[in-house]
């Protein structure tokens, strides 16, 4: 994902603390001002989300048109398959672990406090497209550009990408800490903030542990399939620098040079690593898929919501598509997934804000997990390319 510095995370932490203090000690008229801001920003965010999907997914898909077709097709398939697979595995792990992890914790609906504090006014901002329409439109146009090489439309999509990036950088991202603060102020006012912090702290730990386990399993599969020239322990040691770089930069793109060196040390062929590592930095995000899925299940459980498996499956499958947008958005995949959370799970504004805060808090580990996943997946891509070359 696009790099953002740690000052955003610091501002979010300050926003959470300030929001809690406001909710606990501020008079009601201050809370009403906070609720008014929360409603306005939430409506604005909902208006921008479909534009985010269209502006980032179109050029992302269009750029997949180059390269050797067989290797490209297999690379895109494996990247999408991996992202979706870990989403489903995270879902099933959540079903097994979250109820026992949260045993004895009172279930509390996030967002009920919004009704207790009425805003002074609201302004409706209906989005131009619903989320499903935005995804379908972006996918059709992106594939069309890739196939027809339509230069004019591609240039328009890139210009739209730049415009939406500016909107995010100048409005959404700077106001996120205040939005998070407004939500936590209302949660504190409702008296449920203590349980919420305790529960989602445990969910955070669950996510990080699961991401590390996922990386280990990815290397086990890659080692068994590719049978590389180096030992399994060497594979893991060679990946540590890339993992640490992802942890420190929160940027998949920034780790590309280090991941390229990792692939070279693991004896991946130059053509494959030069092709796949930059590509995987834009389409392969298992760490994000794991985090969003587990946090979603935690919110669903704590709010005593009933979500069908069909809705879960549709969410994970579509989330894999929207991950194409993640590299261009500060805050990564969660920004592209907001609409899906609302459509498939019915998350309210407070639940969406909580998801954003949780995701950003673990973003370093999620990026590191995705980067390590790239180092494992490139071994499989290289072995597949060698197999096709031998048959040719």
Image (cartoon, helix red, strand yellow):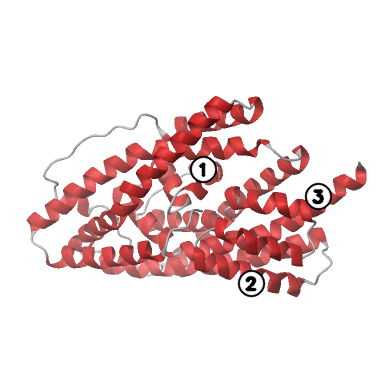
Q: Residue at x 41, y 36 (%)?
A: 51
Question: What is the distance, in whole Å, between disc 2 and disc 3 at their CAs?
Answer: 25 Å
Horizontal and vertical percent for residue 299? 39, 56
Please give the residue where the numbered disc 1 appears in the rendered image: 322
Horizontal and vertical percent for residue 199? 37, 67
Question: Secondary structure beneath disc 1?
Answer: helix
Horizontal and vertical percent for residue 342? 38, 43
Question: Secondary structure beneath disc 3?
Answer: helix
Which of the two labelled residues, at mark 1 and mark 3, occupies the earlier sequence position? 1
Q: Residue at x 76, y 52 (%)?
A: 272
User: In the picture shown, does residue 139 fall above or below 108?
Assistant: above
Please rate how many residues cluster around mark 2, counting C-alpha atoms within 10 Å: few if below 14, some from 14 to 19, many from 20.
Answer: some
User: In the picture shown, does residue 91 fall above or below 160?
Assistant: below
| Residue 57 in sight here | yes
Which of the two labelled residues, at mark 2 and mark 3, occupies the earlier sequence position? 2
Quarter of the figure that contains the C terminus: top right
Q: Nearer the viewer, residue 24 or 332?
A: 332
Question: Secondary structure beneath disc 2?
Answer: helix
Please give the residue where the numbered disc 3 appears in the rendered image: 384
Please give the residue where the numbered disc 2 appears in the rendered image: 240
Horizontal and vertical percent for residue 128? 36, 29
Q: Nearer the viewer, residue 226 or 112?
A: 226
Please rate how many residues cluster around mark 1, counting C-alpha atoms within 10 Å: few if below 14, some from 14 to 19, many from 20.
Answer: many
Q: Is residue 273 left or right of residue 334?
A: right
């Amino acid at each position: 994902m696009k790099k953002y510095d740690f000052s955003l995370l610091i501002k979010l932490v300050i926003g959470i603390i300030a929001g809690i203090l406001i909710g606990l000690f501020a008079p009601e008229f201050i809370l009403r001002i906070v609720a008014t801001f929360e409603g306005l920003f939430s409506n604005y965010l909902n208006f921008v989300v479909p534009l985010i999907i269209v502006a980032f997914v179109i050029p992302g898909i269009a750029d997949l048109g180059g390269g050797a077709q067989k290797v490209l097709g297999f690379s895109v398939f494996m990247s999408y398959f991996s992202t979706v697979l870990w989403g489903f595995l995270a879902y099933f792990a959540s079903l097994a672990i979250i109820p026992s992890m949260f045993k004895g914790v009172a279930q509390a609906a996030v967002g009920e406090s919004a009704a207790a504090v009425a805003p002074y006014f609201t302004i409706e901002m209906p989005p131009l497209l619903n989320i499903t329409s935005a995804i379908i439109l972006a996918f059709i146009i992106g594939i069309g550009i890739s196939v027809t090489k339509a230069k004019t439309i591609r240039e328009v999509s890139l210009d739209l990408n730049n415009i939406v990036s500016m909107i995010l950088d100048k409005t959404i991202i700077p106001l996120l800490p205040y939005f998070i603060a407004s939500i936590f102020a209302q949660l504190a006012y409702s008296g449920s903030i203590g349980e919420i912090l305790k529960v989602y702290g445990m969910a955070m730990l669950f996510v990080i542990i699961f991401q590390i386990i996922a990386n280990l399993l990815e290397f086990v599969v890659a080692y068994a399939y590719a049978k590389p020239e180096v030992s399994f322990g060497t594979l893991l040691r060679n990946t540590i620098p890339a993992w640490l770089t992802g942890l420190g930069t929160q940027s998949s793109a920034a780790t590309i040079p280090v991941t390229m060196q990792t692939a070279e040390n693991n004896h991946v062929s130059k053509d494959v690593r030069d092709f796949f590592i930059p590509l995987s930095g834009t389409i392969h995000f298992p760490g994000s898929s794991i985090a969003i899925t587990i946090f979603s299940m935690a919110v669903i459980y704590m709010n005593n919501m009933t979500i069908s498996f069909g809705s879960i499956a549709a969410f994970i499958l579509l989330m894999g598509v929207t991950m194409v947008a993640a590299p261009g958005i500060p805050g990564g995949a969660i920004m592209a997934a907001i609409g899906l959370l609302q459509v498939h799970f019915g998350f309210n504004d407070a639940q969406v804000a909580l998801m954003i805060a949780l995701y950003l808090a673990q973003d370093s580990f999620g990026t590191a997990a995705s980067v390590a996943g790239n180092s494992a997946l490139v071994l499989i891509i290289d072995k597949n390319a060698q197999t096709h070359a031998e048959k040719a």
